[in-house]
Structures are given as C-alpha cells and as structure tokens.
Image (cartoon, helix red, strand yellow):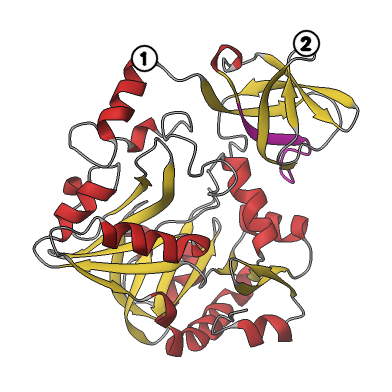
Amino acid sequence: MKNTALTHIHEQLGAKMVPFAGYNMPVQYEGINIEHETVRNGVGVFDVSHMGEFLIEGEKALELIQKVTSNDASKLAIGDAQYSCLPNKTGGIVDDLIVYRVKEFTYLLVVNASNIEKDWSWIAENNTMNAEMKNISEGYSLLAIQGPKAVEAMQTLTSEDLSAIKFYTFKVGDFAGIENVIISATGYTGSGGFEIYCKNSEVEQVWNKVFEAGKSFGIKPIGLAARDTLRLEMGYCLYGNDINDTTSPLEAGLGWITKFTKDFTNSEALKQQKETGVTKKLVAFELTEKGIPRQHYTIVDAEGATIGEVTSGTMSPSLKKGIGLGYVKTAFSKRDTEIFIQVRKKAIPAKIVRLPFYKG
C-alpha cells in the first residue's frame, strides 16, 4: 500500500484510513455529512495526491493528445484546462482526465489513480509520433481546496488574484511560500475552489499554511467519502462506476467532450453511434419514497422488467433523499419518467431528473 506525503498527518488527525487505488487514503475525519456541509457552505481540503500526472512535451505533444483524447485540445490557450476522455478501440473509455496547457509545447494530463499504469501504457502505445512523455505521478502532490469561501480564505497565501482565475483555467505562481505551484480553478465538488499541484517535498508546508489561512473560515480536512457524495450531487461521472471500458462517451452523456471536428481513437465508430443513436443512456434519478440506491442495484419498469442498473447511488446530504446515476434503455431516459429501483425485495419508485441534483 502506497502512502501520500501527508498520510502521517491524516493519521494524526484521527482520519479513518482505507485502501483506495493502491493508496492508504483518508475516507473520513469527523463524518460524511459534516464534511459534505463544510464544502457546500464553507471551505474544506482534500488530499488527492494519489491522482496521476503525465507531462506530454515537444512539438508533437498536441498531435499525440489529439489522437488519444476525445475533446479538442487545439482550442486550449496556455493557462486553460479541459475535461476529456481517452476512448478505446471498442467503443468504451480507457479513462477520463483533465488536460492542462502549461506552455506552448507542454501539456499536463491528470488521470485517475486506479488507471495510472493502464493510461500510461495506452498513451505510450499510441505515441507513434514520438512526443516526449514523463510520468511524474510519484513526485507530485495534489490538494483540492473546495467550497464557496476558498477564494477569500486562500487569498493571503498568493500574489495571484484568485478571483480572476476563471473555472477551468489555472495560473502557475507562488502559493503558501512555494514558487511554481499550479493553482487550478477545477474540482470535483461543484462548490468552487482550487486544486493545488506541488512537489511532495513542498506539500506539508502548503497543507499547514492552508489550514492557518483558513482557520477563521472554519476550514476542515475532508475525506474521500464526502468527495463521492459531493460529486454525485453534481452528477459528475466516476470512473469504474459510471464510465468504464464498456461504456461509450455518448451513452454516458459525454457527447459535449466528444468532438468530431478531428480524428481520434475510434472516432469513426463513435460518429456512427451518434448518427444511429444509443440503446442505453446514463440517467440521473431521485427516489420518490424512502430508500438508498446503491451501485449494481437493478432498475425495473412498472411491470418489474429489468431496464437497467444503478452505477452510483447515495443518500444526498444536501437534498435529504436517495439519488443516483444509472444506465437505462433509451426509451426510459426522458425526464420525469417513472422507474423503480430494486432495493432487496422492494421496488422503490424513482423519477428521472435533470442534473445537477444540487442546484446551490
């Protein structure tokens, strides 16, 4: 089991630690609901240093990224970030990721922790143009400082104007006394804030200064459990749950990051799928009676016939009701359609809703 550079701090804070993607990670400190509310209303900090980081550099960098990702990275100016995915050759997804354009010929790819080796091999296999690739995952840490008070709480730590860093853009600047830190207005919570990339040797100083600066704002450390409830309230896909090697970006509602203005891996087949239409779709649903939907629960119609499966589900801390994502046959994917979630022997009614669940 690998540790992050901050594992000892999480243990000192009394975090409940669990194995996650090969790492020893904090799942919760005080409790999911308290941590969830802290991020929705104030500011909280996640250690997500288990995530993977690849540098793709040189004059052929963009060519490689355009080939392996579904979104159009040619649209990125220096300082822009872009959500994208790596399609495979059989209609599914190798991983979802964020692409950062750091310099003219330097891109940073941030990938899911559980897929680091798989993604690296996939990109390397497709690197027929010999772009320069560096896997820097082991040397870098990532803190997500999330919540509506993040800008105000963190402004004293940097000479950059945090309020000027727009969503899905970033600055490379000073932060918490460290130079050349990536300050990115991205996150997985839907409540605003930043993601901070720095070296492992620097992250403890950053963590301590972040908590000093945020003290009067009620800052708290947040675990992976609340990260999951926060992202689910926004309807953000989680790799391994809502998207995987067998789900297409179009089935997953990721048509907006699938740009057919360029050629990329399996783009012809996906274009064909767009034209003919998909047979199943990822939908968002809310239970209309008491219950908690969980991954792999069966989704049925009024007659009890199977029409799909839950991919993510929870009791929403903000909405106080059961919410989830799941794939259903396309005929059942329209908003307000009634479906039923099989919870043990009971079929609990639910309705298809529009994302996000949490409207802020």
On the image, numbered disc 1 is attached to which residue? 276
Where is residue 251 shown, x and y percent of the image? 47, 29
Asked if residue 100 can be seen in this view, the reply is no
Whether 26 is drawn above or below 252: the answer is: below
Dot 2: within a 10 Å radius of its alpha carbon, few (fewer than 14), some, or many (20 or more) residues? Answer: few
On the image, numbered disc 2 is attached to which residue? 302
Check residue 36 in the rendering and tell me which mark sits there, or answer none: none
Secondary element under disc 1, as helix, strand or loop, is helix
Q: Which residues are magenta?
A: 315-327
32 displayed left or right of 251: right
Question: Residue 139 or 192: which is nearer the viewer?
Answer: 139
244 displayed left or right of 134: right
Q: Residue at x 31, y 71 (%)?
A: 160
Dot 1: within a 10 Å radius of its alpha carbon, few (fewer than 14), some, or many (20 or more) residues? Answer: few
Question: Residue 327 or 28: which is nearer the viewer?
Answer: 327
Q: CA distance from mark 1 to mark 2?
A: 28 Å
Question: Residue 334 or 193: which is nearer the viewer?
Answer: 334
Which quadrant, please, contains the C terminus? top right
Where is residue 105 shown, x and y percent of the image? 13, 65
